[in-house]
Amino acid sequence: MAEQNNLKEFTKGIVQYNPLFVLVLGLCPSLAVTTSVKNGLAMGGAATFVLVCSNFIVSMVRPFIPREIRIPCFIVIIAAFVTMVELLMKAYLPPELNASLGIFIPLIVVNCIIMYRAESFAYKNKPVVSILDGAGLGLGWTLSLCLVSAIREVLGAGTIFGLKVSESYQPASVMIMAPGAFIVLGLLLGLFNWRKLRRSEKSMKAYIKHD
Amino acid sequence: MIKEIALIIVSVVFVNNFVLAKFLGLCPFLGVSQKTSAAMGMGVAVTFVMTLSSAITWIVYNFILLPGDANIIAKVFPSIRELGLVEVLKTISYILVIATLVQLVEMMLRKMVPALYESLGIYLPLITTNCAVLGVALLNTTDAPKHMGFLQATVQGFGAGIGFTVAMLLMSGIRERLALVNIPQPLRGIPIAFICTGLMALAFFGFSGMVQ
């Protein structure tokens, strides 16, 4: 039973609580770095690392943090891990990848997803479930970043993971610039809403029939 | 001098608008842009915090973080003179400066302009996690293409705030009209706001190339 619950804490972040498409959080980096799948993966990985670590530490030290000053405490914990991840990425990843992520790595500090999980989950739960929760939401965010960046990279650059998709396709470079990002994300959010609406309509019809 | 300042402002308001070209500060941009009055209040508060935090983070960067003779900490710990603290402390020190400043603004507003304080509500403390504020601090100091002076950094902070306000006001005008229009159900709310922002960003592309 306990194992099932743990599994649920992990998987809920992927679809049910998907940070980008359901909670609509962490918008700035989701739009800025999703010009190629490689960038999306690197950003998602970095944020997942910070999310898991900060959830773990917050849930470990929660008995010692008074309610009134919890937010500054969270920020300092998160900022420490962001500094770590930034130094690690500078040391081990290719410089051009670091250059294209730019200021969005230090800006993980103000990513709402991490703060939201610290405040609404890790501050109230035990360390193990908090790690699972962080890992699940991080994975969900990384997957949605990959989806957005795959669409933008294919349409805007005609490549995926740097490989050419088709010889005859003329890339529409507006898709990897600012306007394309907003429009792709708007349409994807619309798609998710449409799916949700259709589902609730179906269950409503089934309910009426049943009656 | 005046020409340079004017260039920075035009560049950061129109050409490199923080919201529309750099994707910074999207959460409040979408969250508070339903009514023009709230958008205006938020814009003013953000501009104020951005200007002050640009000035203070510039001082922190140049006198505490950068290696060299000007470093204050190096007077106590000589090893800091060569190494500096930029890599290790920039994120933490900037976010602490911003958080303190937002708290200060909140207390001041509550005492001096209670009406504005009420109307900003939850969004005031949220300025701390507005990535445009931290973003402009980073773009002024560590991520600037070349070293910026104190005045330039402060003006860039002020201009970024004005650019944010302009984008918010335009968006809230559009959204007030969108509320009366028959939009397909799944696109209502955030999705249509995103598509409108995309079209606005496309329009702002017209300014590109005006200033390098």
Image (cartoon, coloured by chain):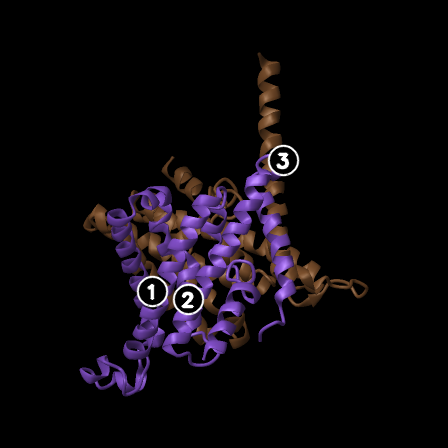
Chain colours: A brown, B purple
Amino acid carrying label 3: it is Val
Distance of label 3 from label 2 (alpha carbons): 36 Å
- Lower sequence index among marks 1 and 2: 1
* The label number, if any, that marks residue B89 in the structure image: none
Residue underneath mark 3? B181
The reply, left or right, for residue B54 in relation to residue B33 is: left
SS at circle 3:
loop
Q: Is residue A85 left or right of residue A210?
A: left
Number of numbered discs on residues: 3
| Residue A210 in the image, given as x and y percentages of width and height | 59, 14
Comparing B5 with A146, the one in front is B5
Identify the residue shown where x is 34% and y is 64%.
B52
Q: Which residue lies furthest to the right in this view?
A: A168
Residue wearing tag 2: B157
The amino acid sitting under disc 1 is: Leu
Is residue A21 visible to the viewer in this orientation of the structure?
yes
Image quarter where the N terminus of chain A lies is top left
Numbered disc 3: what chain?
B
What secondary structure is found at the residue carrying circle 1? helix
Residue B68 percent coordinates (x, y): 30, 86
Mark 1 and mark 2 residues within 8 Å of each other at the beta carbon: yes
